[in-house]
Amino acid sequence: MMPRCVRYLMILAGLCLALPLRAAEWRETQDLPTVLQEAQAKGRYVYLAFLGLEWSVASRKWWQEVGQQPEFLKFADERMILVLANGTARKLPKEEEAAYQALVQHYDVQAYPAFYILAPDGSVLLQHGTTPASPAQYLQALDTLLVPLSPQ
């Protein structure tokens, strides 16, 4: 029979292995000024995704196939800060709607989904819409494009 302390250690080790790896989380657009400051301090890119999760089939598909996948979130945790600009069909308070529309105009969003990769200083490095690339190919392209940066 196994000693009790060994059994507890095995249970604890199993629980630790079951915990998910640290992964990036999606921030909201009202955090964008703070995110840009954080990106500069940490040497990270900003991945700004304009999605219409309530009404855009392409947005929902990207969200499920890429945006919520552990591989994407792990990659993002290493090189990017994720910001979600989710266009909603619901009525928003006037201030929120005005702020969202200003962001849409600033980045000249013409269709959903739209993705912007920003340098830590806020300049746009890349803008694109949907892509025929598989999620793995997309991550590989991001890996090639987004060379690791040094914190400032």
Image (cartoon, rainbow, N blue to C red):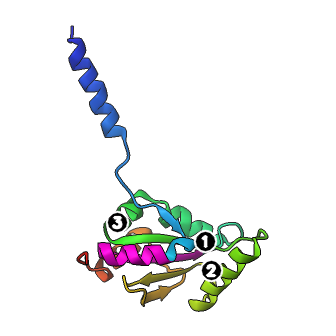
Mark 1 belongs to which amino acid?
A: Ser
- The secondary structure type at the circle numbered 1 is helix
**Residue 11 percent across, percent down from the top left:** 31, 25
From the image, state whether disc 3 or disc 1 is nearer to you. 3
User: How packed is label 3: few (under 14 Cα within 10 Å), some, or many (20 or more)?
Assistant: some
| Nearer-N-terminus badge (3/1) | 1
Judge whether residue 54 is colored magenta: no
**Residue 27 percent across, percent down from the top left:** 51, 66
For label 3, the residue is: 75
Residue 137 in sight here: no
Marking on residue 59 = 1
Location of residue 41 by image quarter: bottom left
The answer to whether marks 3 and 1 mark residues whose Cβ atoms lie closer than 8 Å is no
Is 65 above or below relative to 35? Answer: above
Which residue is nearer to you in this view: 131 or 3? 3
Q: Is residue 11 left or right of residue 3?
A: right
For label 2, the residue is: 112
**Residue 114 percent across, percent down from the top left:** 56, 81
Q: What residue sits 46% from the left and 70% below the top?
A: 82
Q: What residue sits 31% from the left and 39% below the top?
A: 17
- The secondary structure type at the circle numbered 2 is loop
Marking on residue 142 = none
Is 13 above or below relative to 6? Answer: below
Location of residue 118 by image quarter: bottom left
Cα distance in 3D space between marks 3 and 1: 20 Å
Cα distance in 3D space between marks 2 and 1: 7 Å
Q: Is residue 12 left or right of residue 96?
A: left
Q: Which residues are magenta?
A: 33-50
